């Protein structure tokens, strides 16, 4: 299952900048524990899916998982061995732009030790550094 928008009006988006601190999605809203970023990056739809599978397998389908990011941005790529010019390439995949301080995933209905273990394994699937956070502020 690859995450991507159902319909997109303008599919070719410019790269943009990743710097800055996230202003939204910085507090735990749904679960009890969360995985928060300490860096800015693009996270692909395949990486999001790999993290989802890892967390669900580790929690043995107990509790509930919330995915707080979605890959809205298309990334284009020109075909191999193509000369320069002739316009922008076709969309090759979808990414979520994530800034520092953004909650990526939340888990509820499980013990803290199990949630921390699941997030530790999941963080290895991501290209950025992350931290485990708790809704009550104690980590």
Image (cartoon, grey):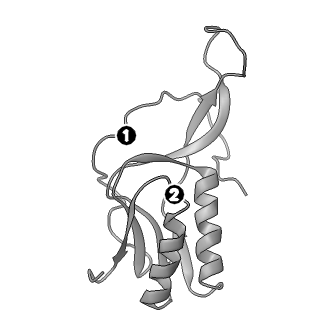
* Image position, residue 91 (x, y; %): 66, 31
* Image position, residue 50 (x, y; %): 63, 62
Q: Residue at x 33, y 57 (%)?
A: 38
- The residue tagged with tag 2: helix, strand or loop? loop
Horizontal side of 58 relative to 69 (left or right) equals right
Quadrant of the image for the C terminus? bottom left
Q: Residues within 10 Å of mark 1 (few under 14, many from 20)?
A: some
Q: How far is mark 2 from mark 1, CA to CA?
A: 16 Å
| The image quarter in which residue 20 lies | top left
Is 118 rendered above or below residue 48? below
Instruction: Report which residue position mark 2 lands on.
Output: 126
Judge whether residue 108 can be spotted in this image. Answer: no
Residue nearest the viewer, comparing 102 with 118: 118
Q: Residue at x 63, y 46 (%)?
A: 5
Quadrant of the image for the N terminus? bottom right
Residue nearest the viewer, comparing 108 with 56: 56
Query: In the rendered structure, which disc, 2 or 1, sits on the residue that comes first in sequence?
Result: 1
Residue 18 numbered tag? 1
- The residue tagged with tag 1: helix, strand or loop? loop
Horizontal side of 91 relative to 21 (left or right) equals right
Is 9 rendered above or below residue 55? above
* Image position, residue 45 (x, y; %): 61, 51
Residue 38 numbered tag? none
Q: Residue at x 28, y 50 (%)?
A: 21
* Image position, residue 78 (x, y; %): 66, 22
Horizontal side of 29 relative to 68 (left or right) equals left
Is 44 rendered above or below residue 50? above
| The image quarter in which residue 132 lies | bottom left
| The image quarter in which residue 47 lies | bottom right
Judge whether residue 121 can be spotted in this image. Answer: yes
């Amino acid at each position: 299952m690859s995450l991507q928008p159902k319909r997109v009006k303008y599919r070719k988006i410019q790269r943009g900048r990743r710097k800055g601190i996230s202003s939204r999605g910085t507090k735990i809203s749904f679960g009890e524990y969360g995985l928060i970023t300490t860096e800015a990056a693009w996270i692909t739809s395949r990486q999001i899916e790999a993290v989802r599978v890892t967390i669900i397998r580790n929690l043995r389908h107990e509790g509930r998982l919330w995915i707080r990011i979605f890959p809205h941005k298309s990334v284009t790529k020109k075909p191999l061995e193509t000369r320069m010019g002739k316009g922008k390439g076709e969309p090759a995949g979808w990414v979520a732009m994530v800034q520092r301080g953004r909650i990526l995933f939340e888990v509820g209905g499980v013990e803290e030790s199990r949630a921390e273990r699941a997030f530790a394994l999941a963080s290895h699937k991501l290209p950025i550094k992350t931290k485990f956070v708790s809704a009550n502020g104690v980590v």
